Amino acid sequence: GVIMGVISIDFGGKLSGAETVVVLGLVLEYEVLDGSVEIKADCTGTARTRARLKGSSQPPMEIVEKIIVLPEGEEKRTVQAAAILKKEGLCVPVLLGNPDAARKAAAAHGADLSGIEIVEPSSDAKFKEYAAQYFELRKHKGISEAEAAAAVRETLVYGVMMLHNDRVDGYLSGADHATADTVRPALHIIKPAPGVRTISSFFIMIFPSPKQ
């Protein structure tokens, strides 16, 4: 779920000097060189990156949509976020959980889930395959096949299995779970990169007013 690279746009030499561009709320720097604008984009967990240069009539750039799984699919803020992501075309959100419970939460909080896939792990076509994979990944810890199947029924685990199998491009949770609960499945399934021994996390807080 990481978009990283250099994007160049030709503005016919109309712009000059260093400017600031906003990419999905992230302020990045770009430089105009010989009429070409180079933007270094590093957007984690973002499905589509849009950038509009200040004072330009050019349409926003777009990077191919990515699929982001939201395992807390019955939680009110999550269904609201999924509806916004879908409406604004920022990504293709996938909710995990009971479809009826997700739709009930959405209706109670004014979220439109039309066109959004809702996956219930235990009834998903890939459930048995993911359970078998999880067993192979964790059998050295002494878990049984039944315990592996029970673990994969948990949406946080199932979401990471979807990411592990390249079914989705990103995974986002934590609205209704502690950081440890969110990170643990990733450590068990995807695991840290070779040589990495310390895992860290961070929060991004967006306030309505800069003064807050």
Image (cartoon, rainbow, N blue to C red):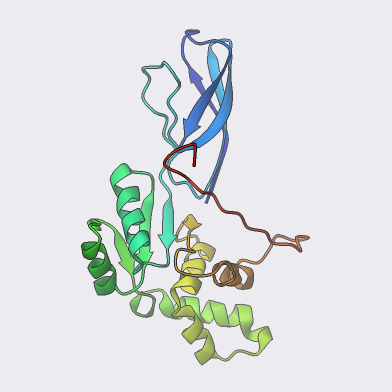
Judged left or right of residue 5, residue 74 is: left
- Residue 9: x and y in percent read 49, 21
- Residue 43: x and y in percent read 53, 42
Judged left or right of residue 136, residue 64 is: left
Residue with the most extreme top position: 13
Count of picture labels:
0
Image point (50%, 11%), residue name:
15
Instruction: Indicate whether 190 appears above or below 81.
Output: below
Q: Nearer the viewer, residue 165 or 45?
A: 45
Q: Nearer the viewer, residue 67 or 86?
A: 86
Instruction: Indicate whether 69 appears above or below 101.
Output: above
- Residue 146: x and y in percent read 50, 91
Image point (25%, 58%), residue name:
113
- Residue 30: x and y in percent read 57, 24
Judged left or right of residue 69, residue 112 is: left
Q: Nearer the viewer, residue 175 or 170?
A: 175
